């Protein structure tokens, strides 16, 4: 791996690396790239792409209109109300 790439990564990550740390980083990155390289050798002929390892179904439910609280009931448990509305802290 070219050293200028290591310097760029360190700069983006705002790291100040010593020469020893750069050498270790280079070895580690090469190991990682070799591991990903093994994926290129995997036999994928006839395999459907899978975007999720486990098939999921829509967990959302249909909206159902139900009875809701009246304004009076909604405000009944708070002392922080004014003119029929919840009163919150002032935002500047």
Image (cartoon, rainbow, N blue to C red):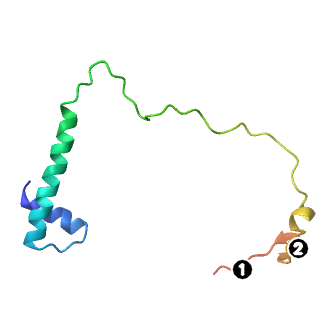
Determine the residue positioned at 86% across, 52% down.
Answer: 68
Q: Is residue 54 placed above or below 22 in the rendered structure?
A: above
Q: Is residue 54 left or right of residue 82?
A: left
For the residue pair 86 and 16, the one nearer the viewer reads as: 16
Label annotation for residue 89:
1
Q: Residue at x 69, y 38 (%)?
A: 61
Q: Residues within 10 Å of mark 2 (few under 14, many from 20)?
A: few
Residue count near mark 1 (Cα–Cα under 10 Å), binned few <14, some 14–19, many ≥20: few
The answer for how far apart the CA atoms under marks 1 and 2 are is: 15 Å
- Horizontal arrangement in the rendering, residue 46 relative to residue 85 (left or right): left
Spot occupied by residue 90 in the image (x, y as percentages of width and height): 70, 81
Left or right: 25, with 85 as reference point: left
> Cβ–Cβ below 8 Å for labels 1 and 2?
no
Q: Which of 43 and 87 is in front in this view?
A: 43
Element assignment for label 1: loop
**SS category of the residue bearing label 2:** loop
Query: Residue 60 falls in which quadrant of the image?
Result: top right
Mark 2 — residue?
83
- Closer to the camera, 51 or 7? 51
Of all residues, the one furthest to the top in this rendering is 46
At which x and y percent is residue 54? 47, 33
Screen quadrant of the C terminus: bottom right
* Quarter location, residue 76: bottom right
**Position of residue 81 in the picture relative to residue 56 (left or right):** right
The earlier-in-sequence mark between 1 and 2 is: 2
């Amino acid at each position: 791996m070219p050293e200028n790439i290591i310097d760029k990564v360190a700069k983006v990550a705002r790291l100040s690396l010593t020469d020893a740390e750069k050498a270790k980083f280079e070895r580690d990155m090469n190991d990682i790239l070799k591991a990903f390289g093994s994926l290129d050798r995997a036999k994928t002929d006839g395999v459907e792409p899978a975007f999720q390892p486990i098939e999921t179904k829509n967990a959302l439910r249909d909206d159902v209109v139900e009875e809701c609280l009246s304004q009076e009931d909604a405000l009944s448990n708070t002392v922080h109300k004014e003119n029929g509305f919840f009163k919150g802290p002032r935002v500047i």
